[in-house]
Image: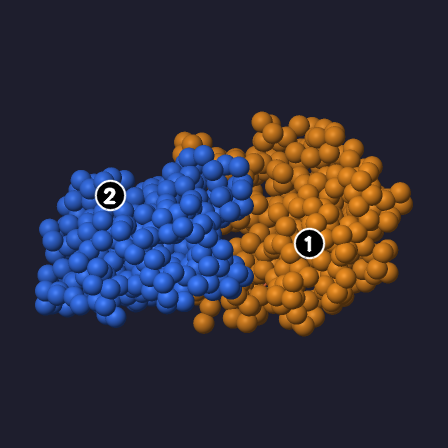
């Protein structure tokens, strides 16, 4: 029996009455406790230091809800924090909106909320306001989460496609494909889940560290859906320049590589949830790399390529492991369903 | 590994220089096609060594008539179509299974077992398994047909479009315009049929046949073996994939195919009708034959206007020579199956090649 005396979510839990009040006070507030949220006002009142703000939102519908290395709660915090982080901001406040299907077990909700709380704590961000809705069985798949995030731009951080120049280096903070391959293998029950673990993590502590210690960062983006291939193509397209990468320098865990090959996926197109790609000034590339490597989320960081002048249209080209060359396309085709 | 690649690359170059003419090697396996492109193998080969992607992608070789038969079945309210994923985007006359999929009726399965399970779970519908593929997938189809027979699961049937590789290779070499000097033979198919199955190609047509695995180094060493043979004026059968492929192949798999299917004449995209190239259920299993059950015939049907998949599959043209390539026809909006399937030649050229970019 849960703290509120119910085992499952009822439609009435979203009805604005006593049940909802109980749900909020007994299940949602305790883990997230902070002064702003405790006011339970219609709006959260924030006192942010002046400066330029970044604002973002994302919805999370991942299936399965729990996966090796994380769950929908952790993902909902990390994903939004990362969107702020790669924009050069330090996350300050999050919102948390839950859409819950009638009949969802409250015990499972508690686990998800606990991991929201833990992830928020780890990235030093507060959940300051939120909302809970319940819908009839079948109108949602268990639980969907939306978070919006507000961040304050790190002083001096000035990122943008237009800052990118030929000669800049491409840096990634670790192995690729971990999140996507974990979800895919778990969904399909492929039986080779060993060694696969989502990289789901909040990157703000690492990105802020970089931005505070060097002026060399020109642009950052997190390679989530569409993977490294999509992100590099977006960067090339946005900057109007081409990118060359080296396959041998791209970190991939052997288990991820093996699983991708078995299923016929190109690991470059597989989603990540704890990675960022940074375009850094050539002269400071090594320094950025060592700043990354001193941080737990950047131990396997690598310089994987560089920005070059464009011959015809902006492209991403890769030198393969055997010394051949090929284009890295913007991924297309069937989107893998609900990996985030 | 790089040492082996460099060595094979050097030797290949020397052999090709000695030959002093264009050499055309055809790979007959979609997995080879993808690996060749993904690894950028073409870019490190001598200029006069050309790789042609042959009829190695199961979805691509499937005749339009078969696709239309599938779409016809998908219209029926009393059927569930169980298909491998690649098949659902192949365009038919005016639609694809994907457009049908939204209306339930069509399910993507990962294995023939899943399709049979679907039949068990839906006793009030007939589940039709879209059985395509070469000797690699045919045994799995045969196994579920036997299972359905043993357990009397009568709401299950298959639409067999299974194809055999060797008859297609013969047909290619018998074609007037063929420029094929040698075959890089498929690894997976060879595991089943054994490399000995290609001996007839070597004997009857004097073309080198070399079986190779799918890693870059295996492919390059396979090509090196072929070029070595050609420059020495030889044509031999050789397996470079000895860890997995034997001369006689997998007897149990061959047996189960033989028990359930007989080879009959069948239509291939681009190649037309080829004798003894398509697997049809034997009479004792005919009640699981969807063609019979629904009175369908696989009449050959025209390719979509302007699509040159047929010529691509025969190695007569390269995808960028098709006027639609990269313009009208892209993976998002494929015109022909070679752009749909991840193993299709057009998709591989589009995805990994520079040609798409050079086009105006
Ligand atoms: S590019 Fe498209 S239209 Fe042309 S042959 Fe290939 S699949 Fe057919």
Label 1's element? strand
Pointer 1 local density, CA inside 10 Å: few below 14, some 14–19, many at least 20: many
Taking the image as shown, residue A17 lies to the left or right of residue B289, namely left
Residue located at (45% from left, 50% from top): A7
Along the viewing direction, whichever of A246 and A56 lies nearer the viewer: A56
Taking the image as shown, residue B245 lies to the left or right of residue B151, namely left
Q: Quadrant of the C terminus of chain A?
A: bottom left
The answer to whether the beta carbon of the residue marked 2 is less than 8 Å from any atom of ligand 1 is: no
Q: Is disc 2 in the same subunit as disc 1?
A: no
Pointer 2 residue = A298
Query: Residue B297 appears at what percent x and percent y?
Result: 83, 60
Label 2's element? helix
Pointer 1 residue = B82
Query: Residue A140 appears at what percent x and percent y?
Result: 49, 61
**Image mark 1: chain:** B
Picture quadrant where residue B259 is located: top right
Along the viewing direction, whichever of A113 and B307 lies nearer the viewer: A113
């Amino acid at each position: 029996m849960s703290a509120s005396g119910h085992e499952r979510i009822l439609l009435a839990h979203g009805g604005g009455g006593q049940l909802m009040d109980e749900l909020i006070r007994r299940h949602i507030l305790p883990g997230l406790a902070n002064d702003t949220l405790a006011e339970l006002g219609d709006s959260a009142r924030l006192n942010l230091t002046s400066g330029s703000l970044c604002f973002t939102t994302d919805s999370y519908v991942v299936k399965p809800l729990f996966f090796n290395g994380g769950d929908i709660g952790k993902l909902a915090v990390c994903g939004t924090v990362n969107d702020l982080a790669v924009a050069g901001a330090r996350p300050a406040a999050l919102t948390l909106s839950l859409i819950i299907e009638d009949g969802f077990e409250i015990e499972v909700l508690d686990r998800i909320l606990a991991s929201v709380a833990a992830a928020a704590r780890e990235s030093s961000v507060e959940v300051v306001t939120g909302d809970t809705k319940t819908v009839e069985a079948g109108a949602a798949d268990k639980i969907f989460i939306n978070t919006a995030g507000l961040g304050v731009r790190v002083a001096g951080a000035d990122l943008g496609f237009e800052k990118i120049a030929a000669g800049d280096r491409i840096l990634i903070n670790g192995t690729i494909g971990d999140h996507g391959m974990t979800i895919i293998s778990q969904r399909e029950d492929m039986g080779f889940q060993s060694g696969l673990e989502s990289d789901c993590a909040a990157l703000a502590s690492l990105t802020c560290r970089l931005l505070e210690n060097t002026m060399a960062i020109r642009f950052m983006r997190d390679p989530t859906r569409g993977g490294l291939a999509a992100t590099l193509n977006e960067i090339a397209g946005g900057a109007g320049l081409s990118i060359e990468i080296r396959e041998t320098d791209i970190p991939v865990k052997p288990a991820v590589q093996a699983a991708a090959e078995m299923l016929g996926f190109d690991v470059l197109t597989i989603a990540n949830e704890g990675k960022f790609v940074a375009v850094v000034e050539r002269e400071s590339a090594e320094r950025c790399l060592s700043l990354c490597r001193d941080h737990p989320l950047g131990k396997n960081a690598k310089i994987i390529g560089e920005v070059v002048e464009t011959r015809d249209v902006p492209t991403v080209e890769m030198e393969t492991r055997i010394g051949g060359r090929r284009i890295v396309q913007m991924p297309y085709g069937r989107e893998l369903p609900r990996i985030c | 590994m790089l040492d082996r690649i460099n060595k094979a690359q050097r030797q290949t170059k020397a052999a090709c220089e000695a030959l002093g003419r264009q050499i055309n090697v055809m790979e007959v396996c979609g997995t080879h096609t993808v690996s060749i492109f993904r690894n950028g193998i073409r870019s490190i080969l001598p200029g006069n060594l050309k790789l042609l992607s042959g009829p190695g992608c199961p979805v691509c070789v499937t005749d339009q008539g078969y696709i239309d038969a599938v779409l016809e079945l998908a219209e029926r309210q009393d059927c569930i179509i169980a298909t491998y994923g690649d098949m659902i985007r192949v365009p038919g006359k005016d639609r694809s299974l994907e457009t049908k999929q939204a209306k339930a009726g069509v399910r993507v399965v990962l294995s023939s077992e899943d399709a049979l399970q679907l039949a068990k779970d839906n006793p009030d519908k007939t589940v039709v398994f879209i059985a395509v593929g070469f000797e690699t997938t045919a045994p799995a189809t045969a196994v579920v047909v036997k299972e359905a027979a043993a357990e009397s699961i009568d709401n299950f049937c298959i639409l067999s479009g299974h194809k055999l590789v060797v008859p297609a290779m013969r047909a290619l070499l018998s074609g007037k315009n063929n420029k094929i000097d040698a075959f890089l033979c498929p690894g997976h198919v060879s595991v089943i049929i054994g490399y000995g199955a290609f001996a007839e190609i070597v004997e009857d047509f004097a073309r080198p046949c070399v079986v190779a695995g799918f890693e870059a180094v295996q492919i390059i060493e396979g090509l090196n073996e072929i070029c070595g043979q050609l420059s020495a004026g030889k044509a031999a059968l050789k397996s470079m994939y000895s860890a997995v492929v034997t001369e006689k192949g997998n007897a149990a798999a061959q047996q189960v195919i033989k028990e359930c299917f007989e080879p009959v004449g069948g239509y291939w995209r681009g190649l037309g009708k080829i004798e003894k190239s398509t697997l049809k259920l034997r009479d004792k299993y005919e009640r699981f034959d969807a063609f019979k059950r629904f009175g369908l015939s696989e009449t050959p049907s025209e390719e979509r206007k302007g699509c040159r998949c047929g010529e691509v599959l025969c190695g007569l043209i390269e995808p960028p020579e098709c006027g639609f390539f990269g313009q009208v026809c892209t993976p998002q909006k494929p015109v022909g199956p070679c752009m749909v399937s991840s193993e299709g030649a057009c998709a591989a050229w589009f995805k990994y090649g520079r040609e798409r970019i050079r086009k105006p």
